[in-house]
Image (cartoon, helix red, strand yellow):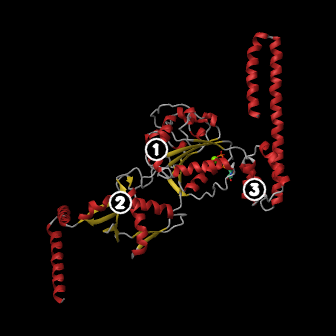
């Protein structure tokens, strides 16, 4: 034993001597080259092979790095001695990670893999348009050369899949926004995210039950349809257009969809996107199992024709509530987002990068949309979110006042049923009345009934006024036509058209 220690000590002495000799004899540049060659020779004879997985691959985030980090977090929590522990802002889960330069041994199909987390401070900051992280981080995977072909591909696939499962289980779902415009963060991401915590579900959504069930089963078929989409050669994506007056639950429906499928949401602010290629880049950076939302599509940019981009440097659009007329002005000024860019976004070849994605567009004015956006197959399902119906009202009464089926007297129910359709109130309007009086259920019901009746009465009066003004116009035109027959025939035609239109509205 004593001899072993003695020879170890002399070996270390020789090593220290060689090292100091190297420092004295070789200038720094040559020393570096020498060590490089030494390393190469050492690796040639080594039984191991090493793989470096850096956090940033050139300018892009390396997804494998994130996956490895997540994957190792589950075993690290059991086996590691010193771990880094994180909890993302507003997240409900802790994530364990290897501390810098710590190792962890994993086994896969009987093969041993050693992971080392390497964190080194970034040397002199190079110039970059976007902020670069201060540390260089990476994992080094070490496996035996003989096992390389045996496991490498399947091991990495397994890690990616496992990481996705862990992310889904541990992390809150995320709501992404592109409010930063086209600029990327330090890790090359154009999207900013916050945990998605909207409580809306299909259960709380007030709408006709049959329609609701239809949408839910459509979503379920989509989520379970991997092999169907594969066999039919279709991209695994689906489009929904939600349209209807403000306050009828379009945004609530999107939240309910995301909660139902457990998908992330990408809320795409089109007015922050300057060019079609920027739009494509945003799409490329979305993950699968996500809902990509464009709200108020009629207001976002002028999408009434398939203009070619002008290629001029575009100005940023700051007012998301710009009307279509305003936005057409913006396009004249050089905003190069076009309808064809948007159609390519949802339908073109690029829309298939990634999979299992849902596109949802919302609008208050479906009539303002270009037919190209509406044609069948583009948006697979058009969902009309209407004023509050009686079945929807019952759901709101349950949500806000806790009334179950049978809790209310038949007489009151009949009264509500009679008046609710005529009132044309949105679920948002009705919710307001109920929230205000939720501590006093009886008062809430009375006020609701009152509000519905008042609104129904108002609607009735304005409908009859419109009708009579339409009739008066016709009479007036007829009178004029009799006075000057040539001029009158044309205007009578016009007027009749107007009368038809107004009838359509009131019906
Ligand atoms: N169908 C509904 N079921 C339950 N709650 C609803 C429904 N519609 C509206 N609400 C309530 O009204 C509020 C506004 O609804 P929401 O934002 O979903 O409407 P919207 O149709 O998206 O309106 P807009 O067209 O103005 O964006 C929500 O906070 C929600 O509580
Ligand atoms: Mg909305």
Q: Is mark 1 on a helix, strand or loop?
A: loop
Q: What element carries label 2?
A: helix
Q: Which residue lies under the disc numbered 1?
A: 235
Q: Mark 3 CB in 8 Å range of ligand 1? A: no
Of marks 1 and 3, the one in the foreground = 1
Q: Is residue 113 left or right of residue 21?
A: right
Front-lying residue, 210 or 272 = 210
Assign the N terminus to one quadrant of the image.
Answer: bottom left
Q: Tell me which residue sits at (46%, 32%) in the image.
A: 310
Q: Position of residue 435 (x, y in %)?
A: 75, 57
Point out which mark residue 156 bears. Answer: 2
Q: Earlier in the sequence, mark 1 or mark 2?
A: 2
Q: Which residue lies under the disc numbered 3?
A: 397
Q: In this view, does 304 lie to the left or right of 354?
A: right
Of marks 1 and 2, the one in the foreground = 1
Q: Disc 1 versus disc 3: distance between alpha carbons? A: 41 Å
Q: Disc 2 versus disc 3: distance between alpha carbons? A: 52 Å
Measured along the vertical axis of the image, is residue 119 above or below residue 504?
below
Measured along the vertical axis of the image, is residue 95 above or below residue 253?
below
């Amino acid at each position: 034993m004593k001899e072993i220690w003695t020879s170890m000590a002399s070996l270390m002495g020789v090593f220290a001597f060689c090292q100091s000799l190297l420092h004295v004899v070789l200038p720094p540049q040559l020393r570096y080259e020498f060590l490089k060659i030494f390393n190469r020779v050492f690796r040639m004879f080594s039984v191991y092979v090493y793989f470096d997985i850096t956090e940033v691959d050139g300018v892009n985030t390396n997804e494998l790095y994130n996956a490895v980090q997540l994957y190792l977090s589950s075993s690290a929590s059991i086996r590691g001695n010193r771990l880094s522990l994180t909890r993302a802002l507003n997240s409900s889960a802790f994530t364990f990670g290897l501390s810098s330069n710590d190792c962890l041994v994993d086994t896969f199909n009987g093969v041993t893999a050693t992971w080392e987390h390497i964190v080194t401070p970034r040397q002199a900051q190079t110039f970059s348009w976007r902020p670069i992280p201060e540390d260089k981080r990476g994992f080094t995977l070490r496996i035996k050369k003989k096992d390389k072909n045996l496991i490498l591909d399947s091991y990495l696939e397994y890690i990616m899949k496992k990481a996705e499962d862990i992310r889904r289980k541990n992390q809150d779902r995320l709501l992404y926004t592109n409010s930063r415009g086209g600029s990327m963060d330090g890790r090359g991401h154009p999207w900013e995210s916050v945990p998605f915590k909207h409580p809306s579900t299909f259960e709380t959504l007030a709408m006709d039950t049959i329609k609701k069930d239809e949408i839910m089963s459509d979503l379920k078929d989509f989520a379970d349809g991997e092999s169907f989409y594969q066999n039919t050669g279709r991209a695994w994506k689906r489009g929904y257009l939600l349209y209807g007056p403000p306050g009828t639950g379009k945004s609530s429906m999107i939240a309910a969809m995301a909660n139902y499928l457990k998908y992330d949401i990408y809320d795409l602010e089109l007015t922050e996107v300057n060019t079609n290629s920027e739009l494509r880049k945003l799409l490329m950076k979305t993950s699968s199992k996500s809902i990509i939302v464009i709200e108020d599509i009629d207001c976002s940019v002028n999408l009434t024709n398939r203009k070619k981009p002008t290629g001029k440097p575009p100005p940023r659009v700051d007012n998301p509530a710009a009307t279509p007329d305003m936005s057409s002005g913006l396009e004249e000024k050089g905003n190069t987002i076009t309808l064809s860019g948007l159609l390519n976004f949802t339908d073109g070849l690029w829309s298939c990068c990634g999979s299992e994605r849902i596109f949802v567009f919302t609008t208050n004015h479906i009539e303002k949309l270009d037919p190209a956006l509406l044609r069948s197959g583009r948006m697979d399902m058009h969902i009309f979110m209407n004023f509050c119906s009686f079945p929807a009202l019952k759901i709101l009464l349950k949500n806000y006042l806790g009334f179950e089926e049978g809790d209310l007297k038949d007489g009151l129910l009949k009264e509500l049923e009679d008046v609710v359709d005529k009132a044309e109130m949105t679920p948002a309007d009705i919710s307001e009345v109920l929230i205000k009086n939720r501590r006093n259920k009886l008062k809430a019901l009375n006020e609701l009934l009152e509000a519905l009746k008042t609104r129904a009465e108002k609607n009735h009066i304005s409908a009859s006024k419109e009708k009579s003004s339409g009739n008066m116009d016709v009479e007036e035109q007829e009178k004029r036509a009799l006075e000057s027959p040539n001029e009158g025939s044309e205007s009578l035609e016009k007027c009749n058209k107007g009368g038809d239109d107004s009838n359509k509205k009131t019906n």
